[in-house]
Amino acid sequence: MTEIASPHISNPRILVHGVMTGRPGTAPFRIVEIDGEVVGEARAVTDVLETAAAFGITVHDLDDPDVVRWVGGDKFTWVPR
């Protein structure tokens, strides 16, 4: 019997958590981690790119799981479900 190779498990430097609601009247946001450390909040995909750039990370493909892991939605999810 032939076994398939073990699946690739990525460990991206950027982790974007699910959408959270803040105080009433404020826009929803997502927590951003880089290298396991919480570095800020993002209210749009551009905030994720700006934060990555501030830490010297160039993101060419937001859909690459080796670069960014999106938790609780994808790059288009910015409102609570």
Image (spheres, rainbow, N blue to C red):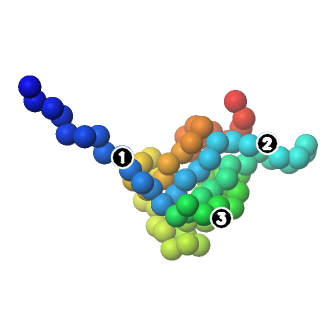
- Is the residue 10 above or below the residue 58 in the image? above
For the residue pair 35 and 69, the one nearer the viewer reads as: 35
Amino acid at pointer 3: Val
SS class, disc 3: strand
Question: In the displayed structure, would residue 80 be above or below residue 46?
Answer: above
Q: Which mark is residue 39?
A: 3
Name the residue at 71% across, 38% down: 79
Q: Which mark is residue 9?
A: 1
Quarter location, residue 34:
bottom right
- Which class describes the residues within 10 Å of circle 3: few (<14), some (14-19), or many (20+)? some
Of the 4 image quadrants, the one containing the N terminus is: top left
Q: Residue furthest right?
A: 24
Q: Nearer the viewer, mark 1 or mark 2?
A: 1
Q: Nearer the viewer, residue 66 or 25?
A: 66
Residue in view at x 57 percent, y 42 percent:
71
Judged left or right of residue 62, residue 41 is right
Q: Kindly tell me whether residue 69 is visible in this rendering.
A: yes
Residue contact at pointers 1 and 2, CB within 8 angstroms: no
Residue positioned most to the left: 1
Measuring from the top left, give residue 22's x and y in whole percent.
83, 46
Q: Earlier in the sequence, mark 1 or mark 3?
A: 1
Q: In the image, what residue occupies the spot 52% across and 58% down?
A: 14
Residue 21: numbered disc: 2
In the displayed structure image, the side of residue 11 where residue 30 appears, left or right = right
Q: Which mark is residue 56?
A: none
* Labelled pair 1, 3 in contact (Cβ < 8 Å): no
Q: Position of residue 65 (x, y in %)?
A: 42, 48
CA gap between label 1 and label 2 equals 30 Å
Could you say whether the residue bearing mark 2 is in a helix, strand or loop?
A: loop
The earlier-in-sequence mark between 1 and 2 is: 1
Relative to 37, is 19 on the left or the right? right
Q: What amino acid does circle 2 point to?
A: Thr
